[in-house]
Amino acid sequence: MSQTENTTSVKKDAIESVLAFDGIDDYVQLPAANTDYSQGFTVEAWVQHKSFRSWSRIIDFGNGAEKNSIVLGNVGKSKPLGLHLFCNNEKHFIEAPNALEIGKWTHVAATIDKSGMGKLYKNGQLIQSKQLSLPDNLNRTLNYIGKSNWVNDGYFEGQMTEVRVWNIARPESEIKENMSQRLKGNETVLVGYLPLNEGSENIAKDKTSNGNNGTINGATWGKSELPITGTKESEIGKKPDVITGGNSPSKYGIADTRTNYYLVDTNKPINGNGEITGWNIWAENTSPVQLITYRKEANTWSVVGKSEVKTPVIGLNEFSLTTPIKVNQGDFVGIYYPQAGSISYDKNTAPLGNLSGKVLFTSSGATATAFSDSVDRIYSLSVKGNVGEIPIKIEKTETANYGVIGVGTNNLLCSRDTLTSDWKEIPNSGAVIGAIVMPDGKIVGVGTNKSLYTRDSLISDWKEVPNSGAVISVTVMPDGELVGVGANNRLYSRDSLTSDWKEIPNSGSVIAVTCSVPPKFTTPEPVPSDNTDQVSKPIKLGPTGGSISGTDFQILPKDTAPQSQLKKVFVNAG
């Protein structure tokens, strides 16, 4: 297909932070990743070129020059956009002439579907298509933004933001619909999301649960008027379409040798409430294996469900569950080996011990939750299932005129009239990680994207508060001032919802904040009485505070306070 003229105009929005590359030696290095692209591949980014360096990169994922490489960048020293793949010992590429521009923000995207059909997009419009091949499923250790794996290629010169990677081919309609919106990071099949908008420090944060944060080398934070707006309000509260958890089943060439033990993999928790209907593994041998699902509450582990013991074949195995396992968002996948291990795993790092690694395991013959050690490994185990309604466990509550308001483990608001009544889910109230009630009755929520949202009542809709992120917790002071915990774990304050955050000096490191308002005591009026034997004189607590003993009281003479007629005692906090 030949390139078509792109007439799409983009809407400019607020001035925001972007990452600027000098074209000399600036780049972002990402950690090693093994992503399953068997169902497809998409990479997107907003770029503004200052020049076209020779074969400069937007992204380059691989293991060196021509080694399992996935490359998106300009072709030669000019404007063509190219996607180049090195897989199955072959080179595949697709290029679109005159796609890139100097000094203008442009959204670019490249996709490959299950059949291997590759497509290039500019500002949401298809500009080229060609038959390619899907990337190999293996571990890539040299992954860059703005840098090539080829030593003679140039570095990216310009600005970049909103780098996104999906393990599915996104259709043109979705690319166009969402290219100018910030994402939340928990979208289905989104495997990497680096907004490149932090504005400080040398970490480019991956907002997906994979947490593949990048290290910034030389690139600096700048400001630019971007054609991007905040997260769509319609996205707030959107639930996942399917249940997923665990890692992509891939061949690493090694399996465990110990016998009769359990392990739990905390790399990628289950993404929603529902039920697991199947599980997949890559097996290095035919030793039997059993799926175990785990839940952690405080420091206590419990088993949620188990599959039948299965005997795998060498290679990819897809098992169905006779009886689905009900799970909650945040549960973990694990396995039990009656004999030696069979599931392939990545052995890049050594054991850490003290249960500090991503994979916890038991000693041989121990019970299912008696974890005694850990490692940082990636096991080729994943689960799948259906979204469903699971009874909500409330994690946080705030009391107000609405009764009790809670944030459920599904990130939706719930309310109950009293502490002993039943929870009622509030429609269209997610996805939030915290909520408070302002003195005027307005509800303020902290979204999963770490921005603030408000709603006038429980039945109204969320409205995003401009310039309110990124915070992970918020509280309100008696005078209406807001205090939040930033993503950097420091305190910030703002006089109102419409003002700006101001960092509070010497306030880190915290993960949550609340306001404790001391009670105000007043001296009560003496109780009027016609009975002259009653006591109306205030009695003061002693100076020691705490529990009360006889020595803490001012004892009145017996004739002024007959014990048989002593009815009221007033305590004066002064």
Image: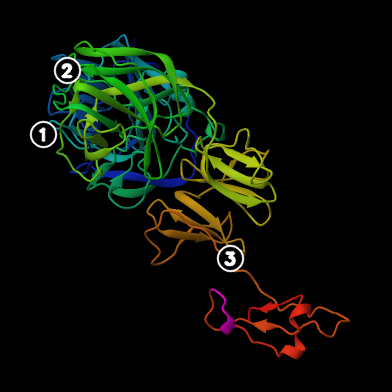
For this rendering, which residue is in front, 533 or 113?
533
Please tell me whether mark 1 sits on a helix, a strand or a loop.
loop
Question: On the rendered structure, is 341 left or right of 5?
Answer: left
First to last magenta residue range = 547-552
Q: Which mark is residue 548?
A: none
What residue type is disc 3 on?
Val
User: Residue 343 appears in which quarter of the rendering?
Assistant: top left
What residue type is disc 2 on?
Glu
Whether residue 510 is visible to the viewer of this picture, yes or no, is yes
Q: Is residue 548 magenta?
A: yes
* Residue corresponding to mark 3: 517
User: Residue 285 appears in which quarter of the rendering?
Assistant: top left
Could you tell which of marks 3 and 1 lies nearer the N-terminus? 1
- For the residues labelled 3 and 1, the Cα–Cα distance comes to 61 Å
Number of marks present in the image shown: 3
Identify the image quadrant of the N terminus. Answer: top left
Whether residue 77 is visible to the viewer of this picture, yes or no, is no
For this rendering, which residue is in front, 42 or 402?
402
The residue under the point 25% across, 44% down is: 356
Frontmost of labels 3 and 1 is: 3
* Residue corresponding to mark 2: 284
For this rendering, which residue is in front, 319 or 292?
292
Question: On the rendered structure, is 262 left or right of 303?
Answer: left
Q: Is residue 518 magenta?
A: no
Could you tell which of marks 2 and 1 lies nearer the N-terminus? 1
* Residue corresponding to mark 1: 151
Above or below, 494 relative to 415: below
The residue under the point 57% across, 48% down is: 397
Could you tell which of marks 3 and 2 lies nearer the N-terminus? 2
Q: Position of residue 11 (x, y in %)?
A: 50, 35
